[in-house]
Image (cartoon, helix red, strand yellow):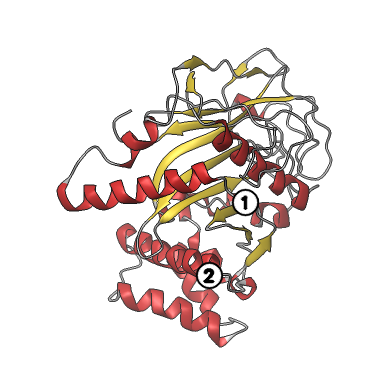
């Protein structure tokens, strides 16, 4: 279905440039079998790779559904980590080895316990993939990730707000050549409140008490991307080429997946203290007054990484935040 939507989106494309870009993606995958999941994955990966290349080059991609945002500048430590991961991925592809996940793990500290927060009924919600988390050894990495979250909230409010029901996590991925590099895929509007007509989906007890009343526009623009020093909203509204990035199984939720953008490395999760459900129903969600640290979960969506954010990092271009904010990194696959 994703490929069908993708193909349909080409026909009414407002510009020849958008159409030719998508057709180049399709031509690399011909002959196509739209019933073959691997062919659909190839289509999505090809389109994502083109977006990453053009985004890093500073090209305007509004006609594709890619809306530019102001992007925080990554610190030197992030660039160094990126180069190290790209090199390791190249070596692993040629000769084998432990791979990028092992490299990332070396930049993390000792395990800590992630307890999550309590829902209004007293149930425990773990926003990170698992109960064990770690901290970035270099605090500038955590501060930069926190700055990306804040940039999303500041520029997209009230549609996007840092809260346990709206924006609280991102996915760190390693894009493959020729657009090799580190990127972050953020998901907002993660737990809209259940509604028999507007949102008839049960998402578990972390959804409990959600004040979100997500509109079709909010869902269509819930995916945000940071890559190559650029940040953007990925609008998957009908008629946009980016709609071809949706998976059939979750198309109604407008979720884009990091697997299509590259090699998933880790999940980054904000840790919120206190009891859930205190946010106000404003736009996507009212923000929590006192978000806590952010952690990184490692190991098959398991262990996490915690970082202390919010302070300005010398030479890193990360602005001081209005409140403490941390980030969790959960290692995905590899040797955790």
- Label 2's element? loop
Q: Residue 37: give x, y in percent of width and height.
A: 33, 58
Q: Is residue 113 above or below residue 73?
A: above
Residue 120 in the image: state x and y as whole percent. 73, 17
Q: Is residue 61 left or right of residue 70?
A: left
Separation of marks 2 and 1 at Cα, in angstroms: 16 Å
| Residue on which the image places disc 2 | 57
Tag 1 residue: 73
Of residues 185 and 308, which is closer to you in this image? 308
Residue 150, located in which quarter of the rendered image? top right
Residue 259 visible in rendering: no
In which quadrant is the N terminus drawn? bottom left
Badges 2 and 1: C-beta atoms under 8 Å apart? no
Position of 75 with respect to 199 (left or right) is left
State the mark number for residue 87. Answer: none
Residue occupying image coordinates x 57% and y 45%: 75
């Amino acid at each position: 279905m994703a490929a069908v939507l993708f193909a349909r989106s080409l026909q009414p494309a407002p510009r020849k440039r958008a159409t030719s870009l998508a057709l180049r993606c399709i031509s690399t995958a011909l002959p196509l079998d739209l019933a073959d999941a691997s062919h659909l994955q190839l289509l999505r990966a090809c389109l994502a790779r083109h977006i990453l290349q053009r985004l890093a080059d500073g090209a305007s991609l509004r006609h594709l559904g890619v809306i530019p945002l102001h992007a925080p500048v990554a610190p030197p430590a992030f660039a160094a980590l990126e180069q190290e991961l790209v090199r390791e991925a190249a070596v692993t592809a040629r000769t084998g080895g432990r791979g990028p996940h092992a490299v990332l793990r070396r930049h993390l500290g000792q395990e800590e316990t992630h307890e999550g927060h309590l829902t209004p009924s007293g149930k425990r919600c773990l926003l990170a993939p698992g109960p064990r988390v770690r901290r970035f050894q270099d605090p500038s990495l955590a501060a930069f990730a926190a700055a990306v979250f804040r940039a999303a909230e500041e520029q997209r409010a009230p549609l996007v707000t840092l809260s346990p029901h709206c924006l609280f996590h991102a996915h760190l991925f390693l894009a493959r050549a020729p657009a090799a590099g580190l990127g972050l895929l953020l998901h907002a509007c993660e737990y809209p409140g259940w509604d028999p007509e507007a949102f008839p989906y049960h998402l578990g007890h972390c959804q409990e008490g959600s004040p979100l009343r997500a509109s079709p526009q909010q869902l269509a623009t819930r995916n945000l991307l940071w890559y190559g020093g650029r940040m953007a909203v990925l609008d998957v509204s009908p008629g946009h080429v980016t709609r071809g990035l949706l998976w059939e199984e979750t198309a109604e939720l407008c979720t884009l997946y990091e697997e299509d953008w590259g090699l998933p490395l880790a999940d980054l999760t904000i840790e919120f203290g206190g009891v859930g459900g205190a946010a106000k129903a404003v736009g996507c969600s009212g923000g929590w007054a006192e978000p806590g640290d952010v952690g990184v979960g490692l190991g098959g969506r398991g262990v996490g990484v915690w970082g202390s954010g919010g302070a300005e990092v010398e030479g890193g271009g990360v602005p001081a935040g209005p409140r403490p904010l941390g980030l969790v990194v959960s290692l995905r696959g590899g040797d955790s």
